[in-house]
Structure formats: structure tokens, C-alpha cells
Amino acid sequence: MSRPTPLADIKIVDLTQVFAGPYCTYQLALLGARVIKIEPLGGEQTRFGGKLPELAAQHLGLAYCTQNADKDCVELDLKADGAVQSVLALAADADIFVQNYRPGVAARLGLGIDALRRVNPQIIYCSISAYGGEGPIGHRPAYDHVVQAMSGIMSTTGTDEMGPVKVGAPYIDYATGLNAAFAVMAALRERDRTGDPQNVDISMLDTALNLMANNLVSAATTGEDLPKLGNEAASGSPSSGCFKTQGGDSIMLAANNERQFSDLCSVLGHPEWLQDPRWVTPKVRHEHLAALRSEIEAVFLSRPASSWELLLDAKGVPASRVRTLTQLLEEGQPQARGLLTTLPVGAGATPVQLPAVGFRLNGHSLGPTQSPKSVGADNGRWLAE
């Protein structure tokens, strides 16, 4: 079957920068939408950094490339005479308009929802912000790590000894981008179903809270905070969590149910643990958690993590050696799923591996086909003389 392009007839005007907004429109571009990315003079800030200085020098830094392939690029000073009118002209026949200014800024620029609806009554207007505009902190600006602190996720990460720890990757940014793309798809469906225009409002904090929905429901219902889990499993199972192994590597284990615990005991060479009165039921295992974990770790220290991973997998016990990203990539699982597409970037055609959508349609992983472009590469195409 040919590659699906479910959004092939959709035009998007994109006024977003950095990660969350551009990742939203990147997902839509991968699904076939025509995305016109409008940047300030010189380009957005992510063009100028990253691990490959030769690309950053060309204003094509890796952080920019990650979520801006498959887009047309327009460079525009929104404070210049006629610039806002140029954006409105682009939006006049567009399906979707996406911006991630602080609440109220787009309206002050003349690009708020009312201005867009005057030129295009059916347009889907998507706003992405830190906190959504309403409420006691709705007006505040933020970045991913600030929202990690605000959302409470840091309070459950790390240990009491080390204090709160943020997640290493900007996962709230990228989850917000995915959430926004999901919302825009829902808005498209609703507009096409009813004929009504749609206003999409995405908050990074809302997204962060939904990413830990179980924690949120528990705290909101009971009024009690959750403890720091460190590397412990959310299940609280004494036979789950992170264990040191021979050579210093760690293995993450999830033996949560009775079948898995039985198979774990078999793999570790201690089937007698199943009859030990301290560990014969889940309840008593919790009561003697420290002793059980000490016994498990003592056995794990007899082999390297890579060996334990294979033995546990053969028995169907979920486990993984703690890997770096490069170690995972060397083993080839993301490539087997078609998650990465290599495209030539910049004057030297530097090969850059860029992400596809995180799902398959009819066997296609839907990666980018057009390399990230230089600042203003499509001004001549989209801006009137």
C-alpha cells in the first residue's frame, strides 16, 4: 500500500517556536499537511545550538532539525509594516493556525482568534501556553523544567536523600506537542462533522498532570502527596524496581504478579522462596520487603545485567538493563520500527536522523521526506511582493 497522507489537503500557519509547538505541527506535517512556519528575523532560537557546530553555524542546529523537517519556512518581522496582514493573508485559506505566545500576546499583535476569524471564519485556532491563561498562574511564562517543578513530578522523582530531580529529557514539551496534535485532529473532525470552527487550548501543565494521571487522581481524591519513588516501581512490588548487578550496571525489573514472582524465583535459582513464610503471599512480601530485596540483589550481583536480561526474558519476566540512548540505538530496535529517517541537512548534506510519528499506518511509520530548510527559504513562495 502507498504511504498514507491523511492531512494532504490541510494547510497550517505555524507561529510556534522551540519544542512543544513545532513538535505539534511537525506531527501534522508528517501526516501530509502543508505547514508554513513563520519565524522572526534570523530564525528561532533552536537554530543556533546543538551537538554539530557546522549545522548551528548554518542556523540549522539539531534542536531545530528535530521538529522542523517537512515544513516551508518564512522569515517575517511581525512588528514591520504589513507583516501582520501578510500572516492574515496566509491564514485566509488555511485550515489551522497554531501559536505558542504567552496568553494575550497574539491578540496584542493583531493575531488573536477574533482577528483570524474575521479573515477565515472556519479556521481552527490552536493556542499552546504554559498554564492556559486562566487561574492564579495562567499568565506566567515557563519552559519544560519549570513546569516539571510546578506540576509535582519532581517531588516524586529522586529520593529523600538527594531531593527532587527533574526528568532528564524535556518530556513535557514533547508530550504537549503530541497532545496539541491530537487535539487539532479532534478539532478537524468536529469542524468537518458540524461545520463549526474550533478553538484549541493546550496547556503544558494540563499535559504534565495527565502524564501522571494516577498520581493526580490519588492526590486530588485523598489530599495526600505521594512519596519519592527514586527507581522503585510505581506498583510498590518488592520484587520490582532497580537492582545493581555484576560489573556495576543496573537492571530494572517488574515481577508484579504471582506468576512473574514464581518465574523470577526460578531464574534466580531460589524456588524455595515461594515457600518461605516471609514471602509466600504478596501481603507478607510487603511486610518483609527489605529482606526480600536484599536477597534478590545479592543474587543479581552474581551476573552482569545483560545476562540477567536474557534469562528473565526467556521466562517472560519483564526486565531491562539500564541503557543509554546510544546503546539502545546500537541494538537496532528503533530502526526496526522505522522510527528514524536519515535526511541530508545544510550545505554539506550532513546526515541527520529525524523522528517519525510514533505509530504506523498500514505498515508505514511516516517519517519526514523534506529536509529542514534555511531561514526564509520560502518567503518568495508565500509572501506577496
Image (cartoon, rainbow, N blue to C red):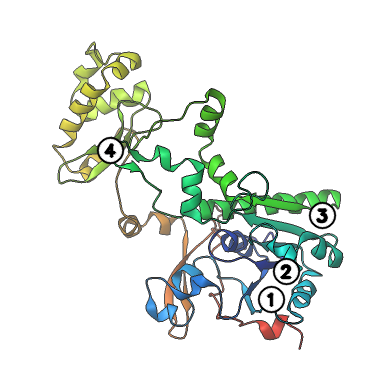
- Secondary structure of the residue carrying tag 3 is loop
Residue at 56%, 58% (x, y): give it: 20
Earlier in the chain: of badge 3 and badge 4, it is 4
- Secondary structure of the residue carrying tag 1 is loop
Label 3 to label 4: alpha-carbon separation:
52 Å
Residue 263 seen from this side? yes
Label 3 to label 1: alpha-carbon separation:
25 Å
Residue 9 seen from this side? no
**From the viewer's perspective, is the residue at label 3 or at label 1 nearer?**
1
Crowdedness near tag 4: few (<14), some (14–19) or many (≥20) residues, C-alpha within 10 Å = few
> Which residue has dot 4 on it?
161
315 and 213: which one is in front?
Answer: 213
Crowdedness near tag 2: few (<14), some (14–19) or many (≥20) residues, C-alpha within 10 Å = few
Q: Is residue 374 left or right of residue 107?
A: left
Identify residue type, mark 2: Leu
> Which residue has dot 3 on it?
197
Earlier in the chain: of badge 4 and badge 1, it is 1
> Which residue has dot 1 on it?
78
Earlier in the chain: of badge 2 and badge 1, it is 1
Relative to 251, say whether 273 is above or below: above
Numbered badge on residue 109: 2
To which quarter of the image does residue 27 belong?
Answer: bottom right
Identify residue type, mark 1: Leu
Q: CB under 8 Å between callouts 2 and 1?
A: yes
**From the viewer's perspective, is the residue at label 2 or at label 3 nearer?**
2
267 and 356: which one is in front?
Answer: 356
